[in-house]
């Protein structure tokens, strides 16, 4: 796990201020001066230290799907980028404007899981308990949200951006110092190359693990067959089909590399994470698609798909948009990871039958 990224030396003095402020805040929580709530049901946090690009949504979906097999499961997200406030249950009929693109995507992908949004996570948990009484709640992107103490804290780390070599914002992309990984019970190194060896895994684990009892897993992303956005029919284009990849995610590199391994001609239009597609954007996308060729298609992510569906689409464009699904696969001891998650919930229920709120 090495650096393939830049940090900005001139901004490091500001980064030290950022790190100092977050360190003081964390100490206040650690000492109990700032209050953190616990709950009577298991709350599993899935988050990161790096801003974007760790595969948080696919891992959240993986864990929630696993837990939903044995009981009612809920996901609580902040709902980044939404135009509403407060608590809101998510349904597939919502738009990204009302609930955010990631919660909407999770609601569509996981119809058996209750998905909700609330910027106040403690209030959101209490509301979910009152409304649907789930067996377990998965907190999406809550590693820094110290007002809730999760029963299990999972930290995701991008293989391609070593947090031990990165630095806090704005010089780097860390939300807080890498030393705060000691709050994690489990660390998952994500987006690993499929050929990573056991010796490299062991070396990375030794670097990441602190004095606490922690476990490290390694995962990669696997892509499924393309499906048409308008009707979800599976589509298998010829390798000679020209592809226009259009993304509004933090890190499109892996997706583009996969497409280039599959198709001969791949172009890219990349927007910032959570980007809202405007009429001007769609006109540019349509013109670029036509310039590539009459048989060209757009390929986008499941996260971007929710924003495309809510956009004012020019006639004929939506039928040429295809979605590339993504899934998590653990490279070693995946069954053990699954068992640890499910056993945590069972153990919590056995040992915490009283109400802790």
Image: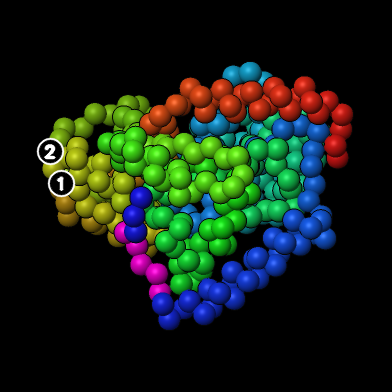
Between residue 105 and residue 354, name the one nearer to us: 354
Question: Can you tell which mark lies on residue 235?
Answer: none
Q: Quadrant of residue 299?
A: top left
Q: Are marks 2 and 1 in contact (CB under 8 Å)?
A: yes
Give residue 242's position: percent from left, percent from top.
17, 44
In which quadrant of the rendered image does the C terminus lie? top right
Question: Which residue appears at 42% of the width and 49% of the height?
Answer: 158
Q: Is residue 310 left or right of residue 21?
A: left
Question: Which residue appears at 31% of the width and 29% of the height?
Answer: 225
Question: Which residue appears at 56% of the width and 49% of the height?
Answer: 210
Between residue 129 and residue 45, name the one nearer to us: 45
Give residue 109's position: percent from left, percent from top.
50, 32
**Residue 6 in magenta stretch:** yes
Tell me if residue 289 can be seen. no
Q: Label 2: few (<14), some or many (≥20) within 10 Å?
A: few
Question: Which residue appears at 59% of the width and 47% of the height?
Answer: 211
Which is the main secondary structure of the residues drawn in magenta? Answer: loop
Q: Is residue 212 left or right of residue 217?
A: right
The extreme top residue here reads 70
Which residue position holds label 2? 240
Q: Quadrant of residue 258?
A: top left
Please give the range of residues in magenta. 4-8
Question: Can you tell which mark lies on residue 265?
Answer: 1
**Mark 2 → mark 1, Cα distance in angstroms:** 7 Å
Secondary structure beneath dot 1 equals loop
Q: Is residue 340 left or right of residue 171?
A: right
């Amino acid at each position: 796990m090495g650096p393939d990224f830049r940090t900005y030396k001139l901004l490091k003095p500001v980064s030290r201020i950022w790190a100092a402020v977050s360190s003081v805040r964390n100490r206040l929580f650690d000492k109990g001066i700032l209050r953190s709530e616990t709950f009577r049901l298991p709350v599993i946090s899935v988050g990161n230290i790096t801003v974007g690009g760790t595969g948080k949504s696919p891992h959240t979906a993986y864990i929630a799907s696993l837990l939903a097999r044995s009981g009612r499961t809920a996901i609580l997200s902040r709902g980044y980028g939404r135009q509403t406030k407060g608590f809101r249950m998510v349904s597939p009929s919502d738009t990204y404007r009302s609930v955010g693109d990631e919660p909407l995507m999770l609601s569509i992908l996981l119809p058996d899981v209750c998905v909700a949004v609330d910027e106040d996570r403690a209030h959101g948990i209490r509301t979910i308990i009152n409304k649907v009484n789930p067996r377990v709640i998965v907190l999406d992107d809550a590693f820094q949200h110290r007002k809730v103490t999760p029963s299990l804290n999972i930290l995701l780390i991008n293989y391609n951006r070593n947090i031990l070599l990165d630095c806090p914002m704005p010089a780097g992309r860390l939300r807080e110092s890498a030393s705060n990984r000691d709050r994690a019970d489990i660390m998952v190194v994500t987006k690993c190359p499929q050929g990573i060896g056991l010796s490299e895994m062991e070396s990375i684990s030794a670097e990441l693990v602190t004095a606490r009892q922690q476990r490290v897993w390694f995962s990669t992303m696997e892509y499924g067959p393309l499906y048409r956005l308008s009707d979800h029919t599976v589509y298998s284009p010829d390798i000679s089909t020209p592809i226009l990849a259009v993304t509004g995610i933090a890190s499109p590199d892996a997706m583009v590399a996969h497409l280039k391994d599959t198709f001969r001609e791949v172009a890219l239009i990349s927007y910032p994470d959570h980007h809202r597609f405007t009429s001007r954007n769609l006109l540019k996308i349509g013109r670029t698609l036509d310039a590539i060729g009459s048989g060209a298609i757009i390929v986008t992510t499941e996260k971007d798909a929710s924003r495309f569906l809510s956009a004012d689409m020019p006639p004929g464009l939506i039928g040429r948009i295809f979605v590339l699904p993504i899934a998590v696969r653990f490279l070693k001891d995946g069954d053990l990871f699954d068992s640890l998650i499910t056993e945590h919930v069972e153990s919590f229920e056995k040992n915490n039958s009283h109400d802790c709120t």
